[in-house]
Image (cartoon, coloured by chain):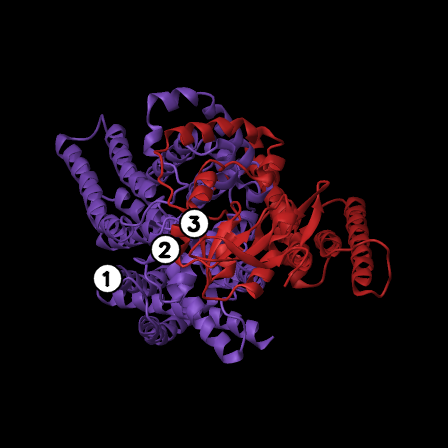
Chain colours: A purple, B red
Amino acid sequence: MIGPCGMIVLTWLWLAGVWLSGWASISLLARFGTRQSLSTKERGKLAGDLATAFLTGVLVCVLPLYVILAVVGRLSAVAFVTVLCVQLGLACLGARSLLRELRHHAGRLQDWWGLVGWALVVGLLASAAALWGYDAQAIYGLKAKILADGLSIYGPDFMDPYRVHYWNNYPLLVPLLEAQVFFWRNQWALLTGEELWNDLGMPVLLWGFIIALVLQVAAATERRWVGCGPWMGLLFAITPMLWRWTEGAGLSGSVDVVFAGFVLSAVLELCQLAERTQLQWGPLIRGALFLTGACLTKQEGVIATGAILGAFVATTVWKLWRGRDSLASLAVRRVILSGARCLLLVGLLVLPTFVFLRVVHGCMPAPPYSRPYLETLNLDWLSRISDRPLTVGAFAVNEFFNNRWGLLWLLGSLSLFLPRRHPIDAATVFCRAFLVLVLAAYLAIFVVTPYPLHFHLHTAFARLMFHIFPVFVVVAIEQIASLPWKRPALPAEPIAG
Amino acid sequence: MMSENIPLGTSGVKSSESPSAGGGNRENGRLAAPPWKSWLLTFVCGLLALLGMGAAVQAGCVILGIYPSGKTVLVKHVGWPLLLALFGLAGVLAMWPRPAWNWVQRWQATMRWAIDFWWAQPWWGRVLIIVGIGHGLISVEYFLNCPEDLLRQYQEIKQFASAPSRLFAGQRVANLEYHIQQYRRAIPPNAQVAYRGSWEAMIVAYQLYPRRLFLLPEDAQRLARAWGDHRWLEIKTKGASRADTWTEEYWAARRPPVEIPPLHQFLAERDIQYMIIFSENHPELCRVLRLNPDTGLACGHIFQEDAPR
C-alpha cells in the first residue's frame, strides 16, 4: 500500500514543484520589467498569475528536455536529475514569493472557497484514477515510457513503422512531462519493491492544467465583470467534460485539456495586442510562448496559430470598418501597421517552433495505417462527400447538447443572439474571430476526413471541441456581462417617474 | 417593479451597499410577505427538508449496513435527498418570520435580493438564469454519480482480469485485461513480440512495456483498411457506421503497393521470438506462440486460453 500511495504523493510534490518554479520564473521576469509587478491590485490578477505560473513551470521543465532530446536523441538520468535540481531551486524561490503574495491577498479570497473545494474533490478523483483513455495509453503514455526508459527517438521505437506505436510522430510535450513523473515514480518503485510503470494517480498532472484553465476563465471574467470571477469560474469548472476520466475528458490522460490551456492563455494574452495600438512586449512574448506550448502539445497547434494570425487580420479589418467614416488616412495607416506588426511578430516568434518540430519529427516515418489529409483535396474525393456537411452539422448539434458539456454551449449560444448594452471591443472581436476560424477549420477537417466519418466523429469531435470550449466560455461570459441586465431599485436611490 | 441597468464592470451590488440594504419590499432585512404566506412557505420548506433528511438517513443506513435492504443503494441516493434537505433548510431560514440571528437576516436579505433580481429581468434574463441552474444540476448529477462510476470502473477491470472471456450481447468475447496478465507472465520483459490482432494492439503495447510489440506488414495493411471496424462503434451508431465502408475501399485502392518482406526475414531483422494472437470475437484463438526467428515457425504454445502453461 505504501508503494502506490508514495507514488501519488510523489506526483503531487512534483506538480507543486512545477507550479512554484513557474511562479519563480514569472516573478523573475517581473523584476526585469517585462511584466507588471505581481502585487498590483488588478482584479483577478492573482488567479491569472497562478495559471500563467503553472503553464510557465511546465515549459520551464519541458523545453530543456525537448532540446536535449532533439540533439542527443535520448534522455539520460543526468538530464532528469539536472532539470529536477533547477526546478527545486526555482521552487524554493517561488514558495517564498507566493507566500508573500497570498498574504497580500488574504482578505480578498473568501469568494474563492467554492472553487477551492471543487479543486480538492477533483484532486481526489485524479489521485484515484489511472491513465484509462485510449489515446492516453496508446499515444502519450507509451511515448512517456519510452522516453523515461532513456531510449532514443531516432531508434526503432520511433523509426520502425511496424513497431506498435500509435502516431509515433506526434509532438512530445506531454510525454516529456509524464516521462519525468514516470522516471521518479520508478525510482520509488525500485525502493519499495513495487511494480514499475504503475500509472495510478498520473492524472494528477492533468489536474494542474484543469485548475489553470479554470483560473484563467475566472481571471478573465473578473477583469470584465467584477465580483463574478469565482462564480463564473465555478460554473465552468463543474462542467463534467472538464474533470471526468472518460475518453477525451479532462482526467482521461488525453492531452486536449493541456492544449486547451495553452490556447486559452495565448488567446487571452494576444487579444491585448489587438486591443491597443501601442506594441506591448509582455503579452506578445507570453502569448507566443503559450502558443509554442500548444504547438509542442498537439499538431492542431498549426491550426491554432493560423487562427490567431487570421484573428489579427480580422480585427484589423473590423477596426477599419468601424472607423470608416471617422478615421483619417494617417490613423488608417497606423491601424494597418499595428495589425501587420502583430501578425509579423507573432509569426516570427512561433516560426522556430515549427522548424524545430520539423527537424525532430520530420524524419519519423508515418505509420502504415495513416491516411494523408492533403490527398483529400482532389475533385474525385470531394465529389463523393457532398452529403457530409449535413452529417457533421447534425452530429455537432447533437454533441453540443450532450450532457457531458452541461448546458454551457446552449447558454453561450443563446447569449450571443441577445442585444448588447455597449459596443463590442477589439479584444472580444479577436477572441470571436479566433473561435470562428478554429471551428470552421475543425468542421472542414471532419467534412474532408479520409477516415470513416462516423468513426472520426465519435472519436475526435468532442476532443476537438474541447480545444475551443474555454475560449467560447470566455466569449460567452463577456457577452453575458454586456447584456442589459436589470437590478431591483434600492431604497436609497431615487425612483424615476 | 422599478429597475435599472447594471453598469459595465459591476456585479450589480455597489461596493458601498450591503445585501441587507437592498430590496424595496422588505422590513429591516426581513421578508415582507403576508404572515399566512410566510408561515405556509416555511412549512412547505420544512417539510421538504424533513423528507430529504429522512430519505438521506435511510439511504445512509442501507449503505452502512445498519438497515439491510435487497436493493442497491448508491451515493447518489444519499446525495440528492441531502441536497433537497439543504434547499429545504435554506428555504425555512429564508422565510422564517422575525429571525433574531444576524446571519439569518443577511441570508433573508440576499434571498430577497435574488428574488427581486429574478422578477426584474426580462424574459431572456430568466431563460439564461434557468439554463445556468440547469447546467449546475446536470453537473451535480455527474458529481454524485462519480463514486459509483469510479467503483464500477475498478470492478470491471478486476472482473475482466479474472476470466479469459465473457458473454456480451449473446456472444462470447475475450477479456483483454485477463490476457494482458497472462502475456506479462509468459513473455520476458526484454522480448520482441509480433502481435496479430486489431486496434487493441496499441493498448497492449502500452500495458506490456518494456516488451516491444510489432505488427506484421500484412496486419498493418489490414488495419489500414479497418479504421471503422469497431464493435463499440457499431453499437453506438446502431449500424450506421457500416455506411462508411466505401471510404476504406477508396483509400485502400489509392494506397501505393507495399513490398512485404518474407516473414522469416521480418522476424529475424527484429529478433522477434514471440507472437501474440488476440481475437476479441474468437476467444478460442487467443494464444502466445514461441517462434523460431530463423524460420518464422512456431516452436509451441506458451499460453492458450484453455491451457495456460
Mark 3–mark 1 distance (CA, rounded to whole Å): 24 Å
The subunit carrying tag 1 is A
Amino acid marked by disc 3: Tyr
Q: Is A203 in front, or is B19? A: A203
- Residue B43 placed where, x, y %? 81, 50
Quick check: A301 left or right of B298?
Answer: left
Q: Which is more N-terminal, label 1 or label 3?
A: 1
Residue B118 occupies quadrant: top right
Please tell me whether mark 1 or mark 2 is closer to you in this view.
Answer: 2
- Residue A175 placed where, x, y %? 40, 58
Under circle 2, the secondary element is: helix
Numbered label attached to residue A166 = 3
Quadrant where the C terminus of chain B sits is bottom right
Mark 2–mark 3 distance (CA, rounded to whole Å): 21 Å
**Above-or-below relation of B124 to B146:** above
Numbered label attached to residue B269 = 2
- Residue A350 placed where, x, y %? 24, 49
**Do marks 1 and 2 share a chain?**
no
The subunit carrying tag 3 is A
Numbered label attached to residue A71 = 1
**Above-or-below relation of B301 to B125:** below
Under circle 1, the secondary element is: helix
The subunit carrying tag 2 is B
Amino acid marked by disc 1: Val
Residue A275 occupies quadrant: top left
Please identify the residue farthest to the left as the structure is shown: A330
